[in-house]
Amino acid sequence: MGNLNLIQARQNMVEQQIRPWDVLDQEVLSLLDQIPRDEFVPDNYKNLAYADMRIPLGHGQFMLEPKVEARILQALVVDAGDKVLEVGTGSGYMTALLAAQAEQVYSVEIHPELQAQAKQRLASHDITNVTLESGDAARAWDAHAPYDAIVITGSMPVLPERYRQSLAVGGRLFVIVGDSPAMEAHVITRLGQDEFTDEVLFETDLPPLENAEQPERFIL
């Protein structure tokens, strides 16, 4: 696909997928139009970079649909002074979007190969306010807490309480909670030391984060 076709595909993504999914924040729409998604997907999926689909990355991981990425950005309202945690670096595309809005992004990836690829892509775009870290953040990642925003890119049957406690007052957390096929995307906002709000954004079905905490289940 040529450059002109990719530009048109990016514009079509915004107008045909993202706006109809209630993403109307102009800053978010402009950001999606500015950062070329095709430069963050695996080479064999470049022609599908702007399609309404999840793109496989290997190791059982994938990029979320563009409309979901857009809803995450709109819901989190990341500001220029914010410190952000991303759980699951993946391709580095969501990392780049967050970095364009935040002061600093800490992104954790469990698979070294994916992290190395994301590092190259971010460097090629001169994105310097991102710290990539290796490890398993399924239960929490307190190293740089408190965070102004947290994005968890895989689903969780239950959200570990430590994640709520990692938020600064006023901080927002995006997470998809539940068991397949019934899951809900939530934005949790910390209003005070022990006060939180929890807004359900949409229903979906997403593979779980590796090593995600499991609820106690009754066995008959």
Image: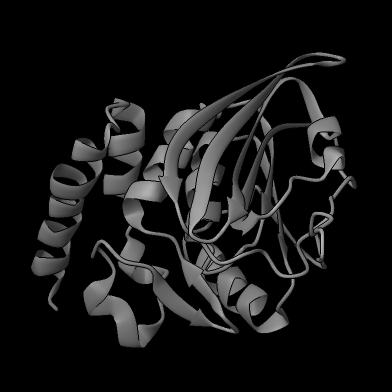
The residue at the point 50 percent across, 41 percent down is: 100
In the rendered image of this protein, does residue 160 appear above or below residue 65?
above
- Left or right of 74, for residue 111: right
Classify 129 as above or below 149.
below
Residue at image position (79%, 59%) is 214
Residue 79: image location, x then y, percent: 56, 25
Depth check: give the residue in front, 220 or 19.
Answer: 220
Say whether residue 153 is left or right of residue 69. right
Give the residue drawn at x 12%, y 52%: 12
Between 14 and 125, the one lying in front of the other is: 14
Q: Quadrant of residue 146?
A: top right
Give the number of callouts. 0
Q: Nearer the viewer, residue 58 or 200?
A: 200
In the image: residue 32, left or right of residue 141: left
Residue 69 place in picture, x, y as percent: 42, 49
| Figure quadrant of the N terminus | bottom left
- Is residue 148 shown to the viewer in this render? yes
Residue 79, visible in the rendered structure: no
Q: Residue 144, position in %: x, y?
A: 86, 42
Image colouring: one colour
Task: Name the outermost residue toward the front.
Answer: 220
Q: Quadrant of residue 191?
A: top right
200 over 41 or under it: above or below: above
- Where is residue 216 shown, x and y percent of the image? 84, 55
Near-viewer residue (149 or 2) = 149
Q: Which quadrant is home to the C terminus?
A: bottom right
